[in-house]
Image (cartoon, grey):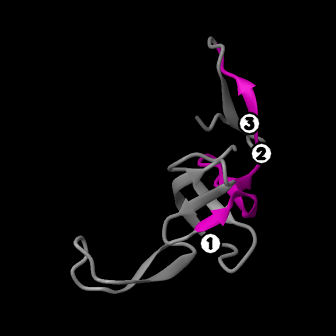
Protein backbone atom coordinates (compact mmCIF):
# COMPACT_ATOMS: atom_id res chain seq x y z
CA UNK A 1 0.00 0.00 0.00
CA UNK A 2 1.47 3.33 -1.08
CA UNK A 3 -0.65 5.50 1.25
CA UNK A 4 0.55 6.28 4.77
CA UNK A 5 -0.83 8.06 7.82
CA UNK A 6 -0.94 11.91 7.55
CA UNK A 7 -0.86 11.82 3.71
CA UNK A 8 -3.33 13.99 1.83
CA UNK A 9 -5.59 12.03 -0.49
CA UNK A 10 -8.36 12.79 -2.96
CA UNK A 11 -11.39 10.51 -3.29
CA UNK A 12 -11.87 9.31 -6.88
CA UNK A 13 -15.06 7.22 -6.56
CA UNK A 14 -18.14 6.98 -4.41
CA UNK A 15 -20.29 9.40 -2.49
CA UNK A 16 -17.34 11.60 -1.45
CA UNK A 17 -15.87 11.93 -4.98
CA UNK A 18 -13.65 14.99 -5.48
CA UNK A 19 -13.07 15.74 -1.79
CA UNK A 20 -9.66 15.86 -0.15
CA UNK A 21 -8.61 14.96 3.35
CA UNK A 22 -5.82 13.79 5.63
CA UNK A 23 -5.40 10.08 6.35
CA UNK A 24 -6.03 9.23 10.01
CA UNK A 25 -5.58 5.45 9.94
CA UNK A 26 -4.41 2.79 7.48
CA UNK A 27 -5.54 -0.85 7.54
CA UNK A 28 -3.35 -2.62 4.95
CA UNK A 29 -4.71 -6.10 5.68
CA UNK A 30 -8.21 -4.92 4.73
CA UNK A 31 -6.96 -2.50 2.01
CA UNK A 32 -8.89 0.33 3.66
CA UNK A 33 -8.07 3.80 5.00
CA UNK A 34 -9.83 6.30 7.26
CA UNK A 35 -9.82 9.91 6.04
CA UNK A 36 -10.47 12.90 8.29
CA UNK A 37 -14.01 14.37 7.96
CA UNK A 38 -14.96 12.06 5.05
CA UNK A 39 -17.38 9.11 4.90
CA UNK A 40 -19.11 10.10 8.14
CA UNK A 41 -21.20 7.30 9.63
CA UNK A 42 -23.67 7.47 12.50
CA UNK A 43 -23.40 4.97 15.32
CA UNK A 44 -26.26 4.56 17.80
CA UNK A 45 -24.75 3.91 21.22
CA UNK A 46 -26.13 2.91 24.58
CA UNK A 47 -25.07 4.64 27.79
CA UNK A 48 -21.93 3.09 29.32
CA UNK A 49 -19.11 3.96 31.74
CA UNK A 50 -17.15 6.11 29.27
CA UNK A 51 -20.21 7.81 27.77
CA UNK A 52 -22.81 8.45 30.47
CA UNK A 53 -25.41 9.62 27.97
CA UNK A 54 -26.15 7.43 24.96
CA UNK A 55 -27.12 8.78 21.59
CA UNK A 56 -25.99 9.08 18.02
CA UNK A 57 -22.22 9.38 17.58
CA UNK A 58 -20.76 10.50 14.25
CA UNK A 59 -17.34 9.22 13.20
CA UNK A 60 -15.29 8.58 10.08
CA UNK A 61 -15.80 5.26 8.35
CA UNK A 62 -13.18 3.41 6.32
CA UNK A 63 -12.82 3.89 2.55
CA UNK A 64 -11.34 1.45 0.10
CA UNK A 65 -7.76 2.39 -0.76
CA UNK A 66 -8.57 1.72 -4.42
CA UNK A 67 -10.99 4.68 -4.42
CA UNK A 68 -8.44 7.31 -3.37
CA UNK A 69 -5.30 8.81 -4.90
CA UNK A 70 -2.37 10.36 -3.12
CA UNK A 71 -2.00 14.15 -3.58
CA UNK A 72 1.56 15.29 -4.20
CA UNK A 73 2.44 18.18 -1.84
CA UNK A 74 4.76 19.70 -4.46
CA UNK A 75 2.53 19.79 -7.57
CA UNK A 76 -0.80 19.63 -5.62
CA UNK A 77 -2.27 17.06 -8.03
CA UNK A 78 -3.59 13.54 -7.44
CA UNK A 79 -0.84 11.25 -8.62
CA UNK A 80 0.38 7.70 -8.79
CA UNK A 81 3.62 6.86 -7.04
CA UNK A 82 6.62 4.74 -7.79
CA UNK A 83 9.46 3.50 -5.62
CA UNK A 84 13.03 4.62 -6.21
CA UNK A 85 16.21 4.19 -4.22
CA UNK A 86 17.22 7.22 -2.17
CA UNK A 87 20.66 8.62 -2.86
CA UNK A 88 23.21 7.42 -0.32
CA UNK A 89 20.82 4.92 1.19
CA UNK A 90 19.82 1.33 0.52
CA UNK A 91 16.16 2.08 1.30
CA UNK A 92 13.59 3.01 -1.30
CA UNK A 93 11.15 5.89 -1.04
CA UNK A 94 7.95 7.04 -2.71
CA UNK A 95 8.30 9.33 -5.71
CA UNK A 96 5.58 11.32 -7.52
CA UNK A 97 5.19 10.18 -11.14
CA UNK A 98 4.05 13.64 -12.28
CA UNK A 99 6.87 15.85 -10.98
CA UNK A 100 9.48 13.21 -9.89
CA UNK A 101 9.72 14.68 -6.38
CA UNK A 102 10.33 12.48 -3.35
CA UNK A 103 7.29 12.19 -1.07
CA UNK A 104 9.08 10.77 2.00
Q: Residue at x 48, y 83 (%)?
A: 42
**Residue tagged by mark 2?**
98
Distance, label 1 to label 2, CA atoms, is 20 Å
Quarter-wise, where is residue 8 in the image?
A: bottom right
- In the rendered image, residue 28, in percent from the top left (x then y), is placed at 64, 48
Report if the CB atoms under discs 1 and 2 are less than 8 Å apart.
no
Name the image quarter holding the C terminus. Answer: top right
Q: Secondary structure at mark 1?
A: loop
Report if the CB atoms under discs 3 and 1 are less than 8 Å apart.
no
91, 28: nearer the viewer? 28
* Residue 44 numbered mark, or none: none
Q: Is residue 24 magenta?
A: no
Q: Is residue 48 above or below residue 11?
A: below
Q: Earlier in the sequence, mark 3 or mark 1?
A: 1
Q: Which residues are magenta?
A: 62-87
- In the rendered image, residue 60, in percent from the top left (x then y), is placed at 50, 71
Amino acid sequence: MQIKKNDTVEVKAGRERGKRGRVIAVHPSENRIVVEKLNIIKRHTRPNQQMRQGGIVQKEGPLSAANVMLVCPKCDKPTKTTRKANEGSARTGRVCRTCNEALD
